[in-house]
Image (spheres, grey):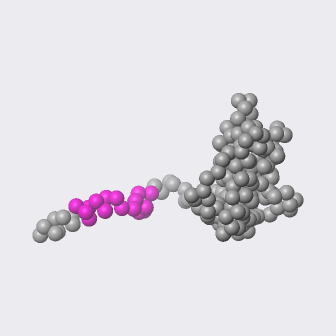
Amino acid sequence: MKKELLCLPLALALVACGDNDSDTSKSASQPPETPPAVTLQSLEDSGEIPKLDRSASLPGTDTDTNGIRDDIDEYVSLQFSDTEQVAAANQAAKANQSVLSTDLTNPTAVRQTNQLISRATACIYEVFGDANSGAEPAVVSRNLEAVTFNTEERLKQYMEFNKALDGSSWSLPEGNSCE
């Protein structure tokens, strides 16, 4: 008897917290949900979000072989018009892209890629840190990371890269770090 009394509140709590996707909870006037791929495509077509390479290729397409994926080149050119800002964003994009080709089993290669990222990040802060730049350096850096590591495989590589850095330390670059 005590067992049943103890289980009853638990069962009632589970029912109360249950899934509300039953037909009675949905209004007949609600439109059917749009699949995420269709929504993503419509947002890209409208220009609300950038059109990005979402292929299975880890590095993506770089037809001009400048070390930056073609869709990221386009993103940078659409986001920034100032020559210094474009150069700083390209340096960061190239450093981010290098993560995707770094041999994560080679500590020297991981450290060298991290140095590229550190220099590029410092450059972003130098160029976009000016009050007249129109963009916050942290936002610029974060957005470049988001568009570069935009697929599951690319994000996994980035996370593994950061894991390979675990326990290491480095200093910030001194002086002008822009290329």
Q: Magenta stretch containing residue 117, yes or no?
A: no
- Front residue of this view, candidates 54 and 42: 54
Residue 40 percent coordinates (x, y):
66, 57
Q: Quadrant of residue 127?
A: top right
Q: Give the residue drawn at x 57%, y 58%.
A: 167
* Count of marks, rendered view: 0
Q: Is residue 78 above or below residue 100?
A: above
Q: Quadrant of residue 60?
A: bottom right
Residue 44 percent coordinates (x, y):
71, 53
Q: Which region is colored magenta?
A: 9-26
Specify whether 117 is left or right of 159.
right
Residue 38 percent coordinates (x, y):
65, 60
Q: Is residue 166 visible?
A: yes
- Front residue of this view, candidates 99 and 150: 99
- Front residue of this view, candidates 5 and 129: 129
Specify whether 137 is left or right of 12.
right
Residue 6 percent coordinates (x, y):
18, 64
Q: Is residue 144 visible?
A: no
Location of the N terminus (image quadrant): bottom left
Q: Give the residue drawn at x 74%, y 48%.
A: 120
